[in-house]
Image (cartoon, rainbow, N blue to C red):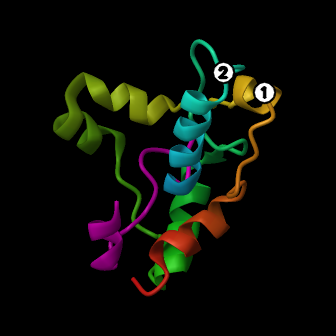
Amino acid sequence: MMPVFQIFAGGPLGSGQQWCSWIHRDDLVNLYLEAVTNDKFNGVYNATAPNPVRMAELCSSLGTTLGRPSWLPVPDFALQVVLGEGAQTVLEGQRVLPARAQEEGFSFQYNNVNAALKNIYKGA
């Protein structure tokens, strides 16, 4: 999404109302480290931040962080042409939560998408 926003053409995919789970790279690395060093971690865990957002909110936050507008939605049919059947995953979204990681006491450094994007793209 970054290249599209950099040329001032960013916007939500589809309706923008679909859920989008995300995770900051630092939290992902820390979750992996916790999983290999903590004996309590066993099985499958969702590697997502605890606060999923709607696609429109993610794009708005990305636009604000980059100092670019988030005004040009990508229509469903365009995604279907580019992604084929994979477009359904993007257009429907998923609201995935890290319940098991939190139950084991894992603490996320970045709970908020705005703070995560600002950290990743500072100076971009």
Q: Position of residue 57 (x, y in %)?
A: 61, 58
- Magenta span: chief secondary structure: loop
The secondary element bearing badge 2 is classed as loop
Q: Is residue 81 above or below residue 16?
A: above
Instruction: Tell me whether circle 1 and circle 2 mark residues in contact (CB < 8 Å).
Output: yes
The N terminus appears in which quarter of the rendering? bottom left
Q: Position of residue 10 (x, y in %)?
A: 38, 67
The C terminus appears in which quarter of the rendering? bottom left
- The foreground one among 11 and 46 is 46
> What residue lies at 35% left-to-right and 40% top-to-bottom?
76
Query: Is tag 1's residue or tag 2's residue first in the polypeptide sequence?
Result: 2
User: Would you say residue 13 sits in the magenta stretch?
Assistant: yes
> What residue lies at 49% left-to-right and 70% top-to-bottom?
120
Identify residue type, mark 2: Phe
Q: Which residue is mark 2?
A: 41
Crowd band around label 2 with a 10 angstrom C-alpha radius: few (<14), some (14–19), many (20+): some
Question: Residue 5 falls in which quadrant of the image?
Answer: bottom left
Span highlighted in magenta in the image: 1-24
Q: Position of residue 39 (x, y in %)?
A: 67, 20
Horizontal side, residue 122 vs residue 30: left or right: left
User: Would you say residue 63 sits in the magenta stretch?
Assistant: no
Horizontal side, residue 87 vs residue 83: left or right: right
Residue 16 in view in this figure: no
The secondary element bearing badge 1 is classed as loop
Residue 11 in view in this figure: yes
Identify residue type, mark 1: Glu
Q: Which residue is mark 1?
A: 104
